[in-house]
Image (spheres, rainbow, N blue to C red):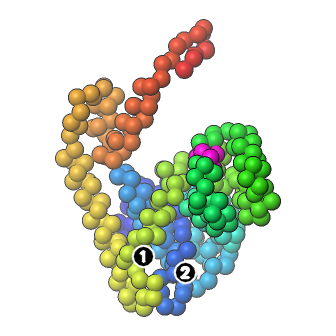
Amino acid sequence: MVKAVISMLYFGDVVTFDTTYCTNIYKMPFGLFVGVNNHFQTVIFGGVMMRNETTESFRWVFKEFIKLMGGKPPQTVLTDQCKSMTIALGFEWPDSYHLWCKWHVMKGIREALGPLFTKNVDFRDEFFTIVNEMLSEEEFETAWYSLCERYKIDDNPFMIRTFECRSKWAKAWSKGHYCARMTSTQRSESANMMLKRFVPINSSMNHFVSQFNRLLHDRDREEDRQEDQTKQFVMKHERLWPIERHAVKLYTKATFKLFRKEVDKAANYVVSGKGLNFYII
């Protein structure tokens, strides 16, 4: 409990809440609060066994979770498309930015489009470009309409509903909000895989609790391992610019590698001054 509160204090700016995995013989949904730490590892803040998924139940879950974790809701919360959950979040965490996790959105689109999504590589590549790389709302909407019209899916009910809620999941709308890279599908998929690995679907309540504790211990062990690696981390490359020498003293090994990728990308551009306040990149 203490470890979870400390983790929430340091890494609770962005939280994913997922109830899509039933982990016991009573078929009760299990809600998992997940974040990401400074090693970009999945960190578990807590879990809750729920009798049902009504708005009232979700309101109680969100209220009690924040009470236990120190009283401060996250900046951003990612969930599936559950309407009851959305309403509950509006009541209990009104200042948190609510996003849909792409893992759930992509799963629904894959099921709705069938072979067009799973077997047509050209369609899939263009679709992911629109979803992940279109940075303006107008650009996204124009490209979406064009794609749906060309592949004759503009009347698909699921695609229509998904587009209507585009502000909940498309990058063009979420880009101004801190998400700790958790909008990608891998984070929720990782949490689900961890549960499946440690907690069999038909577990009894006692076995569930025992296995869930094993999962928490496993996460702690992995975090300790990454801490040790960071302490021993020495940059072996010949190139080490001043900004990198400073960063390597502050960042963990995983974070520094991400930082260096951005530095490498920046090195591909040249900025030329044209006048007092005008630049060409």
8 relative to 49, above or below: above
Residue 184 x, y percent position in the rendering: 52, 54
Q: Which element carries disc 2, helix, strand or loop?
A: strand
Q: Which residues are magenta?
A: 126-132
Q: For the point 29% across and 62% down, which residue is it?
A: 222
In the picture provided, is 211 more to the left or to the right than 201? left
Q: For the point 62% across and 83% down, which residue is it?
A: 52
Any part of residue 130 in sight: yes
Residue linked to disc 2? 29
95 relative to 138, above or below: below
Given residues 28 and 136, the one toward you in this image is 136
Three-letter amino acid code at disc 1?
Lys
Residue 181 x, y percent position in the rendering: 49, 50
The C terminus, quarter of image: top right
Q: Check contact, mark 2 vs mark 1: CB within 8 A.
A: no
Main structural element of the magenta stretch: helix, strand or loop?
helix
**Residue 196, disc:** 1
**Residue 138 painted magenta:** no
Mark 2 / mark 1, whichever is N-terminal: 2
Sort mark 2 into few (<14), some (14-19) or many (20+) by Cα contacts within 10 Å: some
Residue 232 x, y percent position in the rendering: 19, 47
Residue that sits furthest to the top in the current view = 275
Given residues 119 and 261, the one toward you in this image is 119
Estimate the spatial distance between the alpha carbons at disc 2 and disc 1, rounded to whole Å: 14 Å
Three-letter amino acid code at disc 2?
Pro
Given residues 53 and 129, the one toward you in this image is 129
86 relative to 22, above or below: above
